[in-house]
Every structure is written in structure tokens, then in C-alpha cells.
Image (tube, coloured by chain):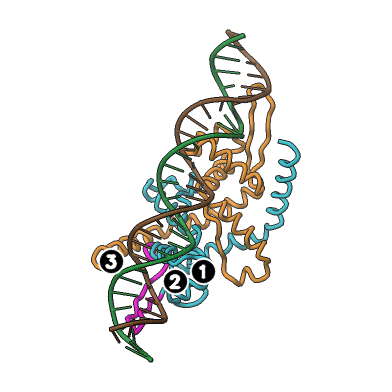
Chain colours: A cyan, B orange, C green, D brown
Amino acid sequence: MADRIDAPADICDDMTPDQQRLIRDILARVVDKWSLWALTELTADGPLRFSRLLERVEGISQKSLTATLRQLERDGFVTRTVVVRSPIRVDYAATELGHALIRRFQPLWLWAAGRLPDFVAARAAFDARTEADR
Amino acid sequence: MADRIDAPADICDDMTPDQQRLIRDILARVVDKWSLWALTELTADGPLRFSRLLERVEGISQKSLTATLRQLERDGFVTRTVVVRSPIRVDYAATELGHALIRRFQPLWLWAAGRLPDFVAARAAFDARTEADR
DNA sequence: GCAATCAGGTACCCTGAGGTAACAACGATA
DNA sequence: TATCGTTGTTACCTCAGGGTACCTGATTGC
């Protein structure tokens, strides 16, 4: 998991180091291997139980899903409600904060999708350059 | 480094798996340990040479800075120009794509900064909850 | 010739994220 | 009673990111 993300100095100037660390922490969580994916599933499709998430977040292990959901819950992006029915059942749902985060992140995704040709071109150019000489 | 970041399905529907993987790749790079920080320094303050960056991106090692800059260069966020002067000199500068990325990322940072109290409260509530029972 | 500066490469090691697999609780059901 | 389904937890292992330390060129100045 990435453990620090920084922002331009002018945004940070009026914050304590502790606050800056917390923000980095939050944003790092947002972009780690599974968090955003899991949260996206929850924002797109009502409350989901553990096993449903396990199926949807394709490739994640039980252990990692548990850890991911705990972190998301701790930071207020997700709620966890235990239903004591027959086979125990746990529902996870995105909070308002969770929805807001996804909404804020989408423009970045769309932008990246739009500039896809630039990335492809940049990589091709770089690889050609390095293969030749350097 | 995080190696995948996903977006809502409706954005992905008209993209090939390869394209989706590339976008995840790009966005993952953006939020890894050092990339965003280094790029931020470059967008804030003209071209910088290797040693200047080494000082500014406080805590990074030579090895990691080299690796980070190579990745940023490969993805088109940074240019690398060698000046063959007396003691060799290499200038790094953010490209238009690099500036655009930082601009796109800033709103997310500002939003997180604004919701700081929510994160603090969520964590406090969670920690109190888990300390008591569970 | 010799030291110093600058940009990097390389070898070695350590840590931590994350996967696998087995086990735990606990009610329902056969 | 035994087994199953569900949500975890725990032990063990692997692998890759990243740090430290040292070495390489190339060039200038002494």
C-alpha cells in the first residue's frame, strides 16, 4: 500500500503535519490495491454482504477483503451491520462520505481515459528511445 | 506500488481490458509512494536537476528517485534532458500531461482536506467501538 | 596524476502487503 | 449427532518495493 501522497505546498501551508499525514493516509487508502474497487461496488449497488463482495471484487482473497473493509469502515467510507439471522449475515454499505469520494475520483478516471492515446504514445516513444540507445 | 485501481463499470464498458489495465496502471503510478510528490515539485518549480529533486523529495533514496523519474518519463509526465556541460547535468521538467495530472488531482486533495473533521470523527468512533467490544 | 562533482547502476538485505489454507464460532437442517 | 453455510481469524510463505552502500564514467581544476 502506498504510504504517502503529497500535494502542492500552498495547500499544505495552513495545516499541521498531523493533518497532512492524515490526508495522505486517507488518499493512500483510496488508491490502494482493493479499497477503491470494493467501495465502487458498494456505491454502485446498494448494501452487499461479504460473500457478494468476495465474488465481485474479482481476485481478492478473504483475508484482504476483511482487511480492506475494516479500513474503509474505520475511515468512515463504509458501514458494517451484522444481521443475526440463521447463517450469520453481514451487510456492507457505502456512507455519504464513501459516495462523495467516488464522485470526486471519477473525473480523474475519465480524464485518464480521455488521455489514453497520450499514454500509449508516450510509452511507445520511450521504449523506442531506450531500445535504440541510452 | 498499488497495481490496480478500478472505476465504476459504466465508465469501463466501452473499453478493452487492455485499455482498462493501462488506465489503472497510470493512476496507480500517480499515487505511489514518490511519483506524485516528485511530479508536484516539478510542476511547482520549473525544471530541476537530479540533485535538487533529491533534496526536495525529502527521504527518497537515489535509487528510488531514478526509478520514479524513469516511470514518470515513460508515461509522458516528465521530460529528461541531458546537458553535457562540465559536471554532467540532467534537467527534469513536467510536461503538459504532468501539469494536467496535478491539476486534476488537486480537487481530490482539497476535498479530503475539507472533510478532515469527518475522518477524525470516523476514526475516533471506530476505535471507541472496537476497544469496547466486538 | 589525483581529487572532486554529478548522474546513475548494482548487490545485498529487510520489511510489509497479500495469497493460500486451515481452523473457529454458531445457528440451521438433515 | 453430524454437516453445512457464513464470516471471519491465524499461521505460513512468497514476492516486490525500497533502503544502504559501494562502484562507474565523464569532466574540470589543482
Q: Nearer the viewer, residue C6 or B105?
A: C6
Residue, disc 2: A94
**Which of pointers 1 and 2 lies earlier in the amino acid sequence?**
1
Which image quarter holds the C terminus of chain B? bottom left
Tag 1 secondary structure: loop
Q: Residue at x 64, y 58 (%)?
A: B22
Residue, disc 1: A57
Residue, disc 3: B129
Q: Crowdedness of circle 2 by 10 Å Cα count: few (<14), some, many (20+)?
A: many
Tag 2 secondary structure: strand
Of marks 3 and 1, the one in the foreground? 1
Q: Chain of mark 3?
A: B
In percent of width and height, residue A33 lies at: 50, 59
Residue A71 sits above or below residue B91 on the image: below
**Mark 2 to mark 3: distance in Å?**
19 Å
Identified by mark 3, the residue type is Arg
In percent of width and height, residue A73 lies at: 38, 66
Residue B106 appears anywhere in the view = yes
Q: Nearer the viewer, residue B21 or B117?
A: B21
* Region of the chain picked out in magenta, as a range: A73-91
